[in-house]
Image (cartoon, coloured by chain):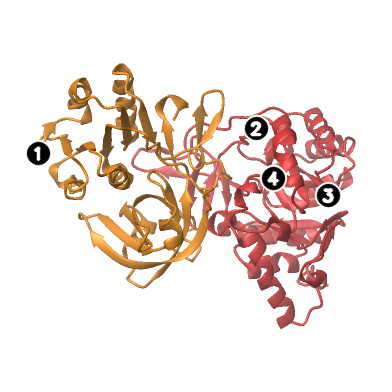
Amino acid sequence: MVKALYDNRLAVDIAGLKMKTPVTTASGTFGFGLEFQDFLDLEKVGAVTVKGTTLEPRAGNKGQRAVETPSGMLNCVGLENPGSDYFIEHTLPELKKIDVPVIVNIAGSTPEEYGELAKKLDIEGVHAIEINISCPNVKHGGIAFGTCPESAAEVVRAVKANTGKPVITKLSPNVTDIVEMALAAQEAGTDALSLINTLIGMKIDIDRRKPVLGNVMGGLSGPAVRPVAVRMVYQVAQKVNVPIIGMGGIMNAEDAIEFFLAGASAVAVGTANFCDPRLAETICQGMLSYLDRHEFKNIQEIIGLALPK
Amino acid sequence: MLTKVIVDAKVIGQKMLSQDVRQIDFLAPEIARQALPGQFVNVQTSTHTAPLLRRPLGVANVDPEKGVLTLIYRIIGEATHILADACTGDRISIIGPLGHGFDLQAKKPLLIGGGLGLAPLVYLAKNFCPNPVEILMGGRTKKELFWMDIFEDLCEAIHITTDDGSLGAEGTVLALLPELLQKGGYDCIYVCGPEPMMKAVVEVAAKFEVPCQISLEKYMACGLGACLSCSCGGVHKRLKVCTDGPVFWAQEVKEW
């Protein structure tokens, strides 16, 4: 039973996933949520999206994994995670004690692996599955599926066939036509879309004359990518019927509002969790102020208001 | 159980320790009362989008009664330049205390440090007082070893090496370490400094069978164990420098 917060003015329903606030956490930036409990009340976050999970544990990439760039950062963590068994046995029981929906971000090397993982996670305590077909930092799977519409559709179908939970597909911005990818995922049955994952970038150490990151290239996130993310949500929202979770460089309520106006039904706070670990909770105050200031009854009323009539 | 807090700490003073090294003191009672030697804090130098991330700095000292937190940093990039411009009275957001500090069981400790790695050793040395503490510090030249003044009151003996021989023995800390371990009777080494130095010390410590604690530094974004930017390889498991460390027993870390 989801308790009401903020008089329900911020409540949203993303394909059956009921969120008390329209704010979740971008996968990979919030750990498993438990790491942030000293700073915020997880029950006041719309949903916790956990770190990308794979069937088997992964060690991630070697060498330096993160570096700051202008108004952003690059990372090449490479999906390090303790694996699905560990998550189910150790992490999920802790999350189940907290009244907050849990979205599990999943990644695999083959559509079958995605399917198997979805089946394994079709259990109590998991409220939705987010398909990661957009991780730029792993050799097999990840973005390989996210840049080809047919492959993306295949993964979505494999997951849908194996779970009764709402399925969210997280798209990569590293494509020529984001709308084509979104339509392919919708056609294959995804219940919602997350836009956007990181943009591929790199940084060179001019003294060592070598790439800074161990994996050479990494995913760019933070405010630097926000205009790209807003643009993609705006384009996709005009063509699809499924709800969109907008993300990319949200640092405050005003940034979040932009995504709603572009057509998102919910948002995720990502890199900003590193700057202010309270933000996924505190951002709601500013969103309510916006609604008051402009005399909107609830957040639903502003979704897509900036889209062409 | 320690609680991590996020506070708007008030700057109460900055001191120039060398041309590019500063000491900054904050009024941050919640952190000062809890922080243990070897722990760190994550400092937000700007409230704009650049520099974006917080900067992790080791706790160089605390005065729990007065609520004072002391950090020592080198001015190297944009964020530390901004920090150097902070004035008394300014408020700076700090998260802490973070990580896992030093094991303080040693009866006869030898502290070894180089560069800014000496900062957390100040608080560690203070913690051992009035029991005798010895420190071995290495620098490139005499100019880098302004640390002597800081450790003078805290340590029974200060051993020094410089690459150019301008102060103490010529060479790296390895120039003195075997001899010290031969006759010193130390029951634990605490090392914090550049990676090659720590790796070399770990090797010598193993040869002399003296337990060794290392304080690692890795690029980190969150400092809370969430982003996994700073993870490294342990024995049959992954370790996070920010939450499992930054202090480890040398044998716990296999790949760093």
Contact check, label 1 and label 2, Cβ < 8 Å: no
Query: Looking at the picture, which amino acid does disc 4 mark?
Result: Val
Query: Looking at the picture, which amino acid does disc 2 mark?
Result: Pro
Q: CA distance from mark 1 to mark 2?
A: 50 Å
Tell me which residue sits at (39%, 39%) in the image.
Answer: B102
Q: Chain of mark 4?
A: A
**Neighbours of disc 3 within 10 Å: few (<14), some (14-19), many (20+):** some
Query: Looking at the picture, which amino acid does disc 1 mark?
Result: Ser
- List x then y, in percent, for residue A56: 69, 27
Which disc is residue A50 wearing?
4
Vertical relation: A153 (above or below) A14: above
Q: Which residue is mark 2?
A: A82
Hue used for the chain lettered B: orange
Kindly indicate whether the residues beneath marks 4 and 1 are on one polypeptide chain: no
Kindly indicate whether the residues beneath marks 1 and 3 are on one polypeptide chain: no
- List x then y, in percent, for residue B174: 22, 26
- List x then y, in percent, for residue B88: 32, 71
- List x then y, in percent, for residue A231: 69, 61
Q: Chain of mark 1?
A: B
Secondary structure, mark 2, is: loop
Secondary structure, mark 3, is: helix
**Neighbours of disc 2 within 10 Å: few (<14), some (14-19), many (20+):** some
